[in-house]
Image (cartoon, helix red, strand yellow):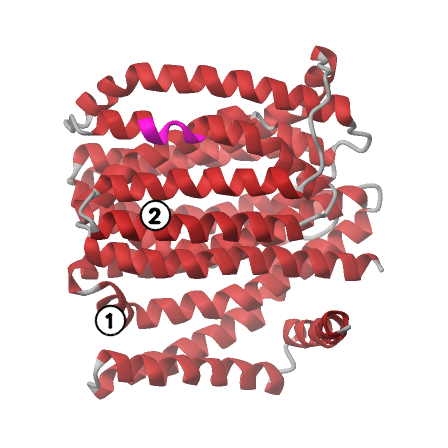
């Protein structure tokens, strides 16, 4: 019964993410054709700033609410009221310093963009506790409707304004509208409402666990996004746009699968936190299954990148292809990080989580400082180097916490990696035929799927059989349920 609930929630989470991102991809294609790369670079700077501030706003409270065994309405309501007040304070500060940020980047037009996009902080403060409530209670079907509703509405707004010639404001309106509608729908579909109670004591208890995750998330977000701020300052907006888009389109696939697994895995593991063996089995299954899905996707995008970009986004975006390929291999191992870190969080070791982040960000900062002088491409390669190193760092505590060593994890991933490489080599050879972009892709994509699925059967890959068994259990019941 519990496995069915986990599978059901994962299904809805994946459906939500992929439904939303399918729409987002279509919109991105349309906007990329209508707008210049410089516009994307401008919005990327503001988005990085608001993302970092949202980490402050969350404060680790969401994870603390999910992890705490006896969290009640007093906990949720206290965090809700705190977030609203803090969100307003952060927005006022951002509003006041907007001209200074614009001056720093030598972009006077950035000031109003910052002030309008900054409103997402206030919206986020209204949404974050609802999200934590949904995650804690495994109600991921609610996310499906809220996210898809916001994305569809934002698609219409963004494309319409871009077509009418509003430039950067088309992207601003798209971001703002998406989050606003997403939040409104979530409030209508989730029945939880804040009570007229507030407790500083409860906040202190939650913060004692959450502050370490806040510090960890802050370190991770700043390190990940500061590269874009550096590129925006040291190089051109176009350079930032190519770097950002190369990372964005490859990262979208991984981020959505990763976020889906992450949001279901943490509350599930937290419920089993007293049984280390169960947590290990969940972690192992998450690593094997997620790499089975993500590895071939990343390999496929890497080998098909050039005809894909030319056909979909036009030749003006070709400079993002090298970035796209580097980030494919960087993101391919992200679910391994997620599974290991979720196990550490679920077992209540937020202290270890923070220590790991300090260690990782220390050597990452050194690598960033050493490479930022040599151009955005070298900075992208440095992400790949530190990602591989961080795999080993993130897995290190789990050799003692649950007897799951990095060598064992590599062994679990090896069949997926090997088969993905074989598929990639064969698919890449198609480019030597000199066919048109669309014909090349029409051969490469089905050929890659055929090789991977056939190889999975021939080599009896465990994750393939696991996914098939889940599909056989779950899909017929869904069909029967809807046919009544």
Q: How many marks?
A: 2
* Highlighted magenta segment, given as a residue range: 116-120
Which residue lies most toward the top here?
A: 200
Within 10 Å of disc 1 (Cα), the crowding (few <14, some 14-19, many 20+) is few
Magenta segment, prevailing SS (helix, strand or loop): helix
Residue in the foreground of this view, choosing between 197 and 355: 197
On the image, which quarter does residue 103 sit in? top left
Q: Is residue 67 left or right of residue 366?
A: right
Q: Is residue 399 left or right of residue 309?
A: right
Measured from the top left, where is residue 290 in percent x and y?
A: 58, 61
On the image, which quarter does residue 106 sit in? top left
Q: Is residue 363 magenta?
A: no
Question: What label sits on residue 157 in the rendered view?
Answer: 2
| Mark 2 residue element | helix
Q: In which quadrant will I find the N terminus?
A: bottom right
| Identity of the residue drawn at 72% across and 35% down | 67
Measured from the top left, where is residue 323 in percent x and y?
A: 28, 55
Measured from the top left, where is residue 410 in percent x and y?
A: 58, 61
């Amino acid at each position: 019964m519990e496995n069915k609930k986990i599978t059901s929630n994962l299904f809805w989470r994946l459906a939500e993410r992929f439904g939303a991102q399918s729409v987002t991809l279509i919109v991105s294609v349309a906007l990329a054709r209508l707008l210049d790369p410089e516009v994307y670079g401008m919005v990327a700077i503001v988005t990085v700033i608001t993302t970092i501030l949202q980490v402050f706003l969350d404060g680790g409270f969401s994870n603390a609410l999910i992890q705490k065994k006896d969290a009640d309405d007093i906990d949720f309501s206290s965090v809700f009221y705190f977030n609203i007040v803090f969100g307003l304070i952060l927005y006022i500060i951002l509003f006041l310093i907007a001209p200074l940020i614009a001056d720093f980047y030598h972009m006077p037009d950035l000031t109003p963009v910052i002030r309008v996009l900054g409103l997402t902080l206030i919206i986020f403060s209204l949404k974050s506790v609802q999200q934590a409530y949904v995650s804690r209670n495994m109600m991921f079907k609610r996310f499906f409707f809220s996210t898809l509703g916001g994305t569809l509405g934002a698609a219409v707004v963004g494309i319409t304004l871009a077509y009418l010639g509003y430039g950067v404001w088309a992207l601003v309106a798209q971001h703002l509208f998406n989050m606003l509608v997403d939040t409104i729908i979530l409030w209508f579909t989730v029945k939880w409402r804040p009570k007229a109670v507030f407790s500083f004591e409860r906040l202190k208890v939650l913060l004692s666990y959450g502050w370490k995750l806040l510090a960890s998330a802050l370190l991770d977000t700043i390190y990940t996004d500061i590269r874009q701020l550096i590129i925006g300052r040291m190089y051109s907006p176009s350079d930032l746009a190519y770097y950002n888009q190369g990372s964005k389109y490859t990262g979208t696939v991984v981020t959505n699968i990763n976020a889906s697994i992450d949001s279901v895995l943490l509350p599930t593991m937290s419920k089993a936190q007293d049984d280390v063996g169960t947590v290990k089995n969940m972690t192992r299954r998450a690593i094997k299954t997620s790499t089975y899905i993500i590895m071939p996707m990343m390999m496929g995008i890497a080998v098909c990148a050039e005809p894909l970009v030319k056909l979909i986004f036009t030749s003006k975006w070709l400079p993002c292809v090298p970035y796209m390929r580097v980030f494919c291999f960087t993101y391919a191992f992200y679910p391994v990080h997620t599974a290991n870190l979720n196990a550490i969080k679920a077992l209540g070791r937020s202290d270890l989580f923070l220590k790991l982040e300090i260690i990782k960000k220390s050597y990452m900062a050194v690598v960033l400082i050493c490479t930022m002088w040599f151009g955005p491409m070298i900075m992208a390669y440095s992400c790949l180097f530190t990602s591989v190193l961080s795999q080993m760092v993130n897995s290190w505590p789990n050799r003692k916490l649950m007897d799951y060593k990095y060598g064992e994890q590599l062994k679990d991933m090896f069949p997926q990696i090997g088969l993905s490489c074989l598929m990639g080599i064969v698919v890449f050879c198609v480019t030597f035929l000199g066919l048109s972009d669309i014909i090349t892709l029409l051969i490469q994509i089905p050929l890659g799927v055929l090789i991977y699925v056939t190889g999975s059967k021939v080599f009896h890959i465990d994750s393939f059989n696991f996914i098939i068994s889940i599909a056989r259990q779950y899909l017929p019941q869904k069909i029967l349920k809807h046919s009544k």
